[in-house]
Each structure stands twice: as C-alpha cells, then as structure tokens.
C-alpha cells in the first residue's frame, strides 16, 4: 500500500483574484510562508519516504518546508503541474466572468476544453496515471505530492468515482492535505481538505 499526501500549495498574491495557471515567478506571500511552516509542523510524527512537486515556484516553495524538515530531495514532476489554462492564463476572475466558455468550463468541465489549453479529463488522466506509477515505485511508503487545487480535485474525483462536473463542490484550501491510500489499484480516501493534525490519521 502507498499512502499519498496530496498537498495544495500555500497562498500567493492575488490568489482567488487572478488565474495564474502556469505563469512563472508566482511565489508564496508572507501568509503563504506562514502556512507552509505550519504545514511542516503538522507532519511531525510522520515519516515521508519521498516528496514530489509541481515545477511551479509556489508549489516548490511549499514542498521545501517539508523536505527540509525531513532531509528529503524534492522531485519535480510535470504530471502534477497546474492546469494549462491556455488563453485564460494571467487573467482576472472578474474578466473571465464575462467569458461564455469560462462559465461553461465551470459548469460542464467534462466536455469543455480550455481555449489553447487542456481539457479537465487530460488533467485527471495525467495525475492519476502518475499516481498509479508511483504507487508501484513506492510500495509500502508514504509520499507527499505538492500540487494545485484542480489537480488534486481531479485525482480525488477519480478515486472516489465522483463525476468531473461535480468536482466544483469539493473545496481544496491552500496548504490543505488530502490523503489517499492505494493498494494494488484499490484506493481509499482517508481525509480531504485536512488542515488539522495528520498523525492521528495513521
């Protein structure tokens, strides 16, 4: 069995206001740095065997706080990168609210492709395929994955058989942890959007 700790990166500037997507150079703000340190504290009593991260700075910065405390090397993994938001990258949510395709994407993601970007099914496929692969590579291990809200929703949705169009009902907060245990293809969701003590789960 492999236990995956799916971690959303900590806060950055204009979170919830601007769709940063894969914009480079977006790092943690002071609130995010504090969140990341508290996250590392929550992992006390838990031994991780590996830590993977989206290649974006805000995820790597979050991963660093955990990796440093456990003397682990962060492994960048593009399978856990943010959604490629294509033409929407860097736009404000206020601007996007007037975009018909954006509204459709948020109501029927299963059949709406992002202009110049990915479909949600492609996001889900890359994340789940990589988790399956890592579960074989890290059997009987505990692995942290630092990623992004929608990528984590996609993975949780797959393993809980939740339709893509209902995933917007799931909240994944900054620096929250969702834990999935995978054993020979069978999966159990141990917690979602957890912001409390993690040691009790194990």
Image (cartoon, rainbow, N blue to C red):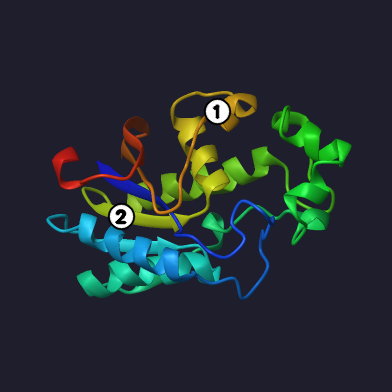
Residue receiving disc 1: 169
Q: Position of residue 193 (x, y in %)?
A: 39, 40
Q: Where is residue 119 in the image (x, y as percent from the top left)?
A: 72, 42
Q: Residue 158 vs residue 115: left or right? A: left
Q: Which of marks 2 and 1 is nearer the N terminus?
A: 2
Residue receiving disc 2: 143
User: Can you see residue 67?
Assistant: yes
Q: With respect to residue 68, does 169 lie above or below?
A: above
Q: Residue 73 vs residue 107: left or right? A: left
Q: Residue at x 80, y 32 (%)?
A: 104
* Category of crowding for the residue at label 1, using alpha-carbon neighbours closer than 10 angstroms: few (below 14), some (14–19), many (at least 20): few
Q: Where is residue 44 in the image (x, y as percent from the top left)?
A: 16, 59
Q: Which residue is drawn at 87% across and 36% down?
A: 100
Q: Residue 44 vs residue 68: left or right? A: left
Q: Residue 56 vs residue 93: left or right? A: left
Q: Residue at x 44, y 26 (%)?
A: 160
């Amino acid at each position: 069995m492999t236990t995956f700790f799916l971690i959303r990166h900590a806060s950055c500037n204009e979170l919830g206001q601007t769709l940063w997507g894969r914009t480079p150079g977006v790092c943690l703000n002071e609130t995010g740095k504090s969140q990341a340190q508290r996250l590392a504290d929550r992992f006390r009593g838990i031994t991780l065997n590996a830590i993977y991260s989206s290649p974006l700075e805000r995820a790597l910065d979050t991963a660093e706080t955990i990796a440093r405390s456990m003397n682990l090397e962060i492994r960048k993994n593009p399978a856990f990168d943010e959604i490629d938001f294509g033409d929407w990258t860097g736009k404000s949510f206020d601007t996007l609210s007037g975009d018909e395709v954006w509204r459709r994407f948020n109501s029927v993601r299963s059949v709406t492709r992002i202009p110049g970007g990915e479909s949600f099914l492609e996001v889900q496929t890359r994340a789940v395929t990589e988790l399956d692969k890592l579960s074989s590579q890290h059997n009987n291990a505990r692995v942290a994955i630092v990623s992004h809200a929608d990528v984590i929703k996609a993975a949780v949705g797959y393993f809980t058989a939740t339709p893509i169009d209902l995933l917007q009902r799931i909240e994944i907060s900054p620096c929250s942890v969702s834990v999935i245990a995978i054993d020979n293809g069978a999966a159990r969701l141990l917690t979602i959007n957890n912001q409390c003590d993690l040691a009790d789960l194990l």
